[in-house]
Image (tube, rainbow, N blue to C red):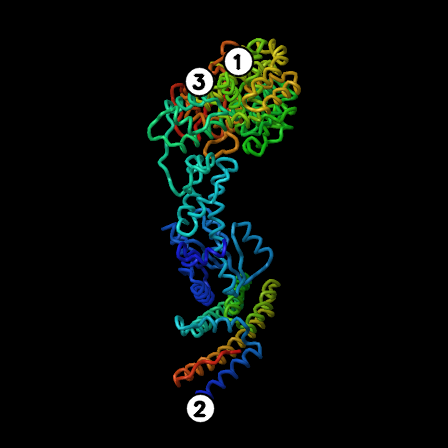
């Protein structure tokens, strides 16, 4: 019981901080609400997909931006656009915001700006991934200990 | 889309269970979307590839009710998918994108998306997407019905059924709109009778010549105005023919009549006015009632001008073509200008064309005109108005009335009456009279008109001869034209009685406009003939009937029928007016006889083909009305 409470408290703290720091927004909460007995691992699934996707896109972008001959900004833009879409779907606010800036650099065909953004995106993504993984771990532990996941709010 | 729909799950669980196809290359979004949709109790299928989606959709069109697609996809542009789905499957498509730029949204809408959602998608938004399915079903049905019969108040019978389960039907129906239109026309006509949504396909009835003849006879017997499907059916006494079939056929017939009368009028006018205006004349305005026969301007100038000024009636969509064959339907009274639908450009052509009847006019103007004449005839016949005969002035006058009415017609009046195309002869006659307008034109017009009528009614049979006669008669007409005009006026007035007042007015106006008011009719005939296209423009409905179909609705099948109908080929001898002899051509008026020429040729062909019963379908019968010349 104590363990569970502790875990739960941790969970709440983590969630709160994620939200507070702008890593996640309400969309994530919606995702959590969608999780039910029919899809108990929904959030984890979506997050996993997101991470995979993110990595793929970041790779695409860095490859494209590294082209010495000439950067295909259209391709970079397409990747950014997609990243923007998935990050907003999961509620990854920070990542999304960077994407917005990233896109304008693409339009301006500013390679430097793009590279900077790419760096930021990579950074934010890593941060988010870690925090979410911690959160998920906590969830599992709570459930394993017989507790229930406290609502974010 | 009422709440009750959702509530009444017992009867119709829709929107629960609505089948959605979700397409998005982003796995995260796709999974989210799928989950959200499932949460809304829809049945979801997902794919990350647009190509796969298309394949799935093509395999079975009825598998889905709705498609949600991302805009940015690697293998295919979302908009492209949207277009394809809309065209091929006619399903509602919702676009999804992280980018909410107004431009993009606009693009989505113009490509046919029924909605545009922004990512991240919220469940609240997805909860309402079923409205698009319902809306489409409703509209499909309505459109289908409406198109058939301008505004049939067809209720939701179809829609209701269509919704939900009948999705397929609706969709299918929509796709087969054209086909169904014929079948569903009865819906329009007698909406009440047909409770079944188009979903219920009845076996198509082929209106053979014989059948059509019976039909026309019945119609004539009853009188175009009194001809109701039920009575017609009784009179026809044909087994296995339903009231709906008759209603549908009647509708087409009426349109046809309208068209021919318009055309006739136009031609006459045109011929008179323009002499050449082939196309315009025939524009006689969609017979449907466009009655824009402005064209009666008679004189050449008028002709051109008339046509030009003739605002293409909406109905005559085809007529509207730039050629503007004026003859769009008989213009409202007073505007009888030769209805030169064709305004500009064509007028000159038309003029020359008129004579040749082979106007290049585009669409059916001519045709339209023709039908009018036919209609007039019909009217006359039916009502016994053979005004033609009454026309004091030579045959021409007689012709006039016919044509006048036809032309004036706004043929709307006529066609509705579906007086039987038999009026072809009348029309022709009338037109011939009017032909005096341009003597040559008239001739052509008359002939054309004749053709047209014939074509449509398949009675046009005599178009060919008409044309020649018309030509000759043209000269005659000219002489007669003068007198005719005068006579025609009044005559026409009388003629239209049956059809509609508009006719009269038109006629009158025709005369007013051009010296050849009546001529206008004649001209129209010419034009009509020439304009095969225009006249046959079946006006508006164009559903399968192609512009030239004057007769489409009617004629095609009526070919023989018409002949037997009261159309008595009046005046034929004279100027060959519209020789109303019902040509068995089966109205081969090619559907889109672009120009009078086509029409004329169509007509000619018909002549040649005499004896070819129109195909039983109204559909595009190739009215070879071409040129009666």
Q: Nearer the viewer, residue A74 or B458?
A: B458
- In this view, the residue in front, A41 or B5, is B5
The numbered mark at residue B19 is: none
* Local SS, label 2: helix
Q: Which residue is mark 1?
A: B470
Disc ID at residue A2 = 2
Disc 3 sits on a residue from what chain?
Answer: B
Marks 3 and 1 share the same chain: yes
The label shown at residue B582 is: 3
Compared to B212, does B170 lie above or below? below
> Mark 2 packing: few (<14 Cα in 10 Å), some, or many (20+)?
few
Residue B343 higher or lower than B401, as above or below: below
Left-right relation of B333 to B240 = right
Q: Position of residue B519 (x, y in %)?
A: 60, 16
- What is the distance, in whole Å, between disc 2 and disc 3 at their CAs? 100 Å
Crowdedness near tag 3: few (<14), some (14–19) or many (≥20) residues, C-alpha within 10 Å: many
**Which-is-in-front pick, marks 2 and 3?**
2
Q: Earlier in the sequence, mark 3 or mark 1?
A: 1
Question: Residue B22's spot in the image, x, y percent?
Answer: 44, 59
In the displayed structure, B338 sits above or below B47; it is above
Q: CA distance from mark 3 to mark 1?
A: 16 Å
């Amino acid at each position: 019981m104590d363990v569970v409470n502790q875990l739960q408290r941790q969970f709440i703290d983590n969630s709160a901080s994620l939200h507070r720091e702008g890593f996640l927004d309400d969309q994530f909460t919606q995702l959590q609400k969608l999780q039910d007995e029919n899809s108990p691992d929904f959030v984890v699934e979506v997050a996993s997909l997101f991470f995979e996707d993110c990595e793929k896109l970041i790779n695409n972008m860095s490859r494209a931006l590294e082209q010495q001959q000439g950067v295909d900004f259209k391709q970079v833009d397409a990747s950014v656009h997609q990243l923007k879409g998935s990050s907003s779907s999961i509620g990854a606010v920070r990542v999304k915001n960077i994407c917005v800036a990233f896109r304008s650099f693409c339009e301006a065909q500013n390679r430097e700006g793009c590279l900077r953004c790419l760096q930021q995106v990579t950074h934010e993504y890593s941060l988010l991934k870690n925090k979410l993984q911690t959160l998920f771990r906590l969830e599992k532990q709570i459930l394993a200990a017989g507790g229930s996941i406290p609502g974010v709010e | 889309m009422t709440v009750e729909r959702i509530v009444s799950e017992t009867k119709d669980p829709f929107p629960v269970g609505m089948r959605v196809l979700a397409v998005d290359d982003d796995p995260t979004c796709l999974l989210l979307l799928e989950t959200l949709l499932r949460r809304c109790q829809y049945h979801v299928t997902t794919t990350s590839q647009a190509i796969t989606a298309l394949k799935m959709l093509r395999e079975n069109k009825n598998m889905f009710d709705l498609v949600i697609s991302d805009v940015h996809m690697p293998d295919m542009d979302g908009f492209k998918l949207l277009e394809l789905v809309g065209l091929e499957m006619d399903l509602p498509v919702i676009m999804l994108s992280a980018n909410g730029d107004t431009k993009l949204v606009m693009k989505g809408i113009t490509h046919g998306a029924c909605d545009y959602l922004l990512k991240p998608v919220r469940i609240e938004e997805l909860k309402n997407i079923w409205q698009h399915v319902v809306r489409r079903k409703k509209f499909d049905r309505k459109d289908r019905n409406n198109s058939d019969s301008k505004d049939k108040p067809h209720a939701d019978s179809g829609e209701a059924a269509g919704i939900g389960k009948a999705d397929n039907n609706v969709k299918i129906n929509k796709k087969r709109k054209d086909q169904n239109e014929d079948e569903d026309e009865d819906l329009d006509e007698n909406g009440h009778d047909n409770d079944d949504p188009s979903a219920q396909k009845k076996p198509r009835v082929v209106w053979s010549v014989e059948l059509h003849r019976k039909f026309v006879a019945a119609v004539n017997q009853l009188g175009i105005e009194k001809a109701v499907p039920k009575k017609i059916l009784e009179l026809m006494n044909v087994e296995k023919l339903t009231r709906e079939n008759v209603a549908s056929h009647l509708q087409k017939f009426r349109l046809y009549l309208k068209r021919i009368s318009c055309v006739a009028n136009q031609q006459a006018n045109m011929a008179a006015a323009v002499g050449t205006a082939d196309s315009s004349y025939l524009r006689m305005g969609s017979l449907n009632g466009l009655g824009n026969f402005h064209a009666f301007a008679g004189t050449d100038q008028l002709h051109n001008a008339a046509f030009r000024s003739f605002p293409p009636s909406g109905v005559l969509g085809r007529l509207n073509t730039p050629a503007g064959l004026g003859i769009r339907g008989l213009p409202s009274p007073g505007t009888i200008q030769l209805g030169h639908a064709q305004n500009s450009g064509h007028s000159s052509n038309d003029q020359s064309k008129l004579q040749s009847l082979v106007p290049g006019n585009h669409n059916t103007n001519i045709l339209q005109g023709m039908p009018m004449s036919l209609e007039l005839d019909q009217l006359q016949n039916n009502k016994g108005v053979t005004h033609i005969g009454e026309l004091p002035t030579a045959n021409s006058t007689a012709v006039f009335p016919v044509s006048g009415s036809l032309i004036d017609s706004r043929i709307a009046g006529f066609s509705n009456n579906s007086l039987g195309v038999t009026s072809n002869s009348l029309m022709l006659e009338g037109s011939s009279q009017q032909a005096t307008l341009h003597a040559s034109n008239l001739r052509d017009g008359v002939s054309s008109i004749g053709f047209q009528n014939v074509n449509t009614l398949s009675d046009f049979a005599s178009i060919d001869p008409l044309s020649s006669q018309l030509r000759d008669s043209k000269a005659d007409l000219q002489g007669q034209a003068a007198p005719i005009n005068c006579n025609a006026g009044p005559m026409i007035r009388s003629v239209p009685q049956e059809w509609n007042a508009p006719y009269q007015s038109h006629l009158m106006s025709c005369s007013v406009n051009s010296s050849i008011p009546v001529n206008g009719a004649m001209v129209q005939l010419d034009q009509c003939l020439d304009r095969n296209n225009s006249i046959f423009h079946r006006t508006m409905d164009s559903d399968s009937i192609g512009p030239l179909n004057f007769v489409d609705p009617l004629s095609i099948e009526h070919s023989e029928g018409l002949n037997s109908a009261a159309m008595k080929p009046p005046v034929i001898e004279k100027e060959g007016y519209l020789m109303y002899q019902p040509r068995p051509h089966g109205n081969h008026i090619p559907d889109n006889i672009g120009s009078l020429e086509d029409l004329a040729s169509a007509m000619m062909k018909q002549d040649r083909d005499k004896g070819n019963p129109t195909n039983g379908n109204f559909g595009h019968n190739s009215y070879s009305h071409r040129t009666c010349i």
